[in-house]
Structures are given as structure tokens and as C-alpha cells.
Image (cartoon, rainbow, N blue to C red):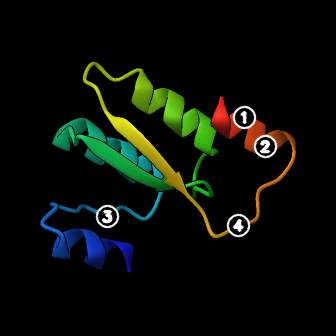
Amino acid sequence: QLQACLRDAGFQVEYERNAHSGLKKIKSWKPHIVVSDYILHGTDYFEFAQTVEAMPFKVQMVVVSSHYLDGPLISQLTN
């Protein structure tokens, strides 16, 4: 649903099913924004985000999830 909403709003959207292919796509496509679920197949979100932040170009990250977050985990996301 999110893909369709973004496309309808005029954004170019690429979708990958796991962290590994997502990182490859980010390296080759160099997007301005990456929207990622917190739950990733192939790695955890923090490792994924650190890898993206270390890339030689600037990428804004947005994390979304339908999972309930509470306690220490939510404080890690907000720091």
C-alpha cells in the first residue's frame, strides 16, 4: 500500500524483499530517501542503517513497522 501511495504522489519507488538486495539497490540507485521496515530479512535494522549511513552519498532513512515497540528498543530508534 505504501508503494502505491508514494507512486501516486509522484515518487519513483523501488522495492527489495531483503536487506542484502536492498543494500545493493541503494548502492546502485543512490536514492534520496530509504523507507525500511524495522524487521528486516538478512540483518537487523541497526546494522542495515549503519551500512547505509557509511555510504559515500547522503541518504535519509525512514523506519516504519507494524510491530509494537517499547522499552529499550524504542530508545535506540530515537537516538
Front-lying residue, 52 or 76: 76
Label placed on residue 5: none
Give the residue type at disc 2: Leu
Residue ID for mark 1: 76
Image point (34%, 23%), residue name: 55
Residue ID for mark 3: 15
Give the residue type at disc 3: Tyr
Q: CA distance from mark 3 to mark 2?
A: 26 Å
Residue ID for mark 4: 67
Give whichever of discs 1 and 4 has the lower sequence position.
4
Label placed on residue 73: 2
Give whichever of discs 4 and 2 has the lower sequence position.
4
Image point (31%, 33%), residue name: 59
Q: Are marks 1 and 2 in contact (CB under 8 Å)?
A: yes
Q: Viewed as shown, does residue 53 lie left or right of 45?
A: left
Residue 41 on image: x %, y %: 58, 58
Give the quadrant of residue 15.
bottom left
